[in-house]
Structure formats: C-alpha cells, structure tokens
Image (spheres, rainbow, N blue to C red):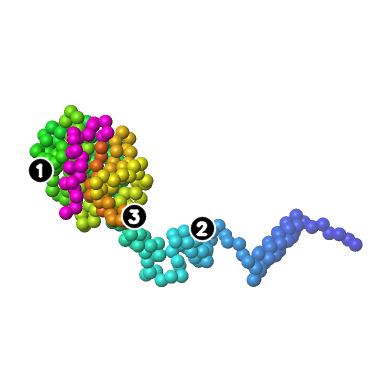
Amino acid sequence: MQRFPLSKQKFGKAIAAATAVLMLSACGESIKPNEPQLHSASEAIKGPSPITMHAAGHTAQQRLGVNSSSNSTNPPTNIVSRSRSYQTSEPTNKQIHHQFIDRIGELAKQGQMANADNFVVGKTLIDEVHKAWGEPNRQAGGFHLYMPGMMKGTIAFGIGRGEVINEIRISDTGLDPIKDGAKITSTEVRSTLGKPFSMRKSGKKTILAYRRGPYQLKFAYTTPKPARNAINIPIDYVSVVSPKAGKPMGRAESRFQQAFEPV
C-alpha cells in the first residue's frame, strides 16, 4: 500500500478539527437535563435562597422569644408577666411594719431613735435637746416629753446622771409608720428581730428587750388577760437605753410608765 505524506497545511487543519470535536463533546456533557447544577460565584453573591431566609428568620424569632405561629398583634407573654410583677412590687402593710422595726433596730446600734434627730443616749445632754427643740411640752417622772406633730407621736427623753440623756422613747402615732391607725405589734417585733434576750413584766406592761451593742432596745405593750393571748398586741412605746448613763432618780420609771397606760 502506497502512503502519501500529508502536507503541513493539511495536517494543521486536521488537528484543529479534532480539537473542535472534543470541545463540543465536553460542552454537551455539562448541560445535561435533570442534573443538579452548582451555583456560580455571581449567583452566590445574590444571597441565600428564600428557604434559607425563612429558617434564619425563624431562628431569630426564637432568640427573641417571639412565637411565630401567634398573631403579631398579640403582646409577648413575657411583657404581660412583667406588668403583673409591677402590680405586686408595692410593699404590703406588713412589709412596711417590718422595715420600720428593722430601721429602729439599726438606729439603736448607734444609740439613736426614729424621729429623734441625731440625739444619742449616753452622750447628748438634755440642754442640747432644749436648744434644738425648745422647752418640752410637759415633764413627767424625770422625762421631758415632746409632741412635734406631723404624725410623729410623742418623743420622750429620760435624764440620767449629769443631765445626760439615758433613754429615748417614742409612742402613739410614732409607732404607726403607715399612719392608718395600726401600730406595730409584738408579733411583728419578734418575727423581725427574733427572740429577745429578756422578757419581763413591769406593772401592766410586758417589755421585750434586745441588745444592740452597748445599748438596749425595748418594746413595751399592755399585758393581755390571759397573758397567753399575747399575739399581735399593739406596742405602746419603744425605747433605746444606755445602761452606762444611769437611771432616773427614785421611782421615776414606774411613774413615767403610768403616763402610757391606756385610758
């Protein structure tokens, strides 16, 4: 068989034709129908699909605590519960009484008493009280009694040795922190301050005594009959005492207690 060598021009045309056939074949394979296609870079820039956006939105709603299935006009349940907590945030009368008793207990640690300015038992002279408040409304059993008004009740200063105040007492409306006619009670005192270190009777009174540093805090109420019914008895007076300042001379203690006897 005789072979005829191809010219260079014909050989180049043959190679070009073969290359074209291969390229057309590759393009046909890349566009087969019903085959999933990959997103191009330009398509990816456009953002997630609607399905992806819906899922992301649902996740954001869950983080915010919003129920996507509920009507958008309904308020979230956490707002309702918060408004209910506001309604119950106001302290009750019982809580106010406890806060008042606790405040008295804290002041007693400093030798002071509610509604009695900065006077301190065992340190303040009665002359200092006179200079600040003027002359007392009356005197009884070695005590100087003031009635300043403004629902502060009666404030009495007991005088010990050397004209030093050894006791400050408050009574009447001064023991009614809400000013609704209900004074603090013996039960509230015990529940706030705990068990007293001393409980004794003096005349018709029962006195609960608590230690507050170098001072004593006393709550006195009229002893009920029978005595075992001493529950929620209104307090007649509260006093802070400095034992080191001495006691009033003679029977001043019992005479002054008579001034607080109920009519």
Is residue 175 or residue 42 the one in the foreground?
175
Question: x%, y% of residue 151?
Answer: 16, 50
Question: x%, y% of residue 79?
Answer: 37, 62
Q: Amino acid at mark 2?
A: Ile
Q: Residues within 10 Å of mark 3 (few under 14, many from 20)?
A: few
Q: Residues within 10 Å of mark 1 (few under 14, many from 20)?
A: few
Whether the residues at callouts 1 and 3 have beta carbons within 8 Å, the answer is no
Residue highlighted by disc 1: 137
Whether the residues at callouts 2 and 3 have beta carbons within 8 Å, the answer is no
Q: Nearer the viewer, mark 1 or mark 2?
A: 1
In the picture provided, is 49 more to the left or to the right than 26? left
N-terminal of the pair, mark 1 or mark 2, is: 2
Is residue 199 or residue 22 the one in the foreground?
199
Residue highlighted by disc 3: 228
Residue highlighted by disc 2: 45
Q: Is residue 5 above or below residue 213?
A: below
Question: x%, y% of residue 23?
Answer: 68, 61
Q: Give the residues in magenta.
A: 242-263
Question: x%, y% of residue 245?
Answer: 24, 31
Residue sitting at x 10%, y 43%: 137
Is residue 175 or residue 45 the one in the foreground?
175
Q: Amino acid at mark 3?
A: Arg
Q: How many marks?
A: 3
N-terminal of the pair, mark 2 or mark 3, is: 2
User: Regarding mark 2 in the picture, which secondary structure is present there?
Assistant: helix
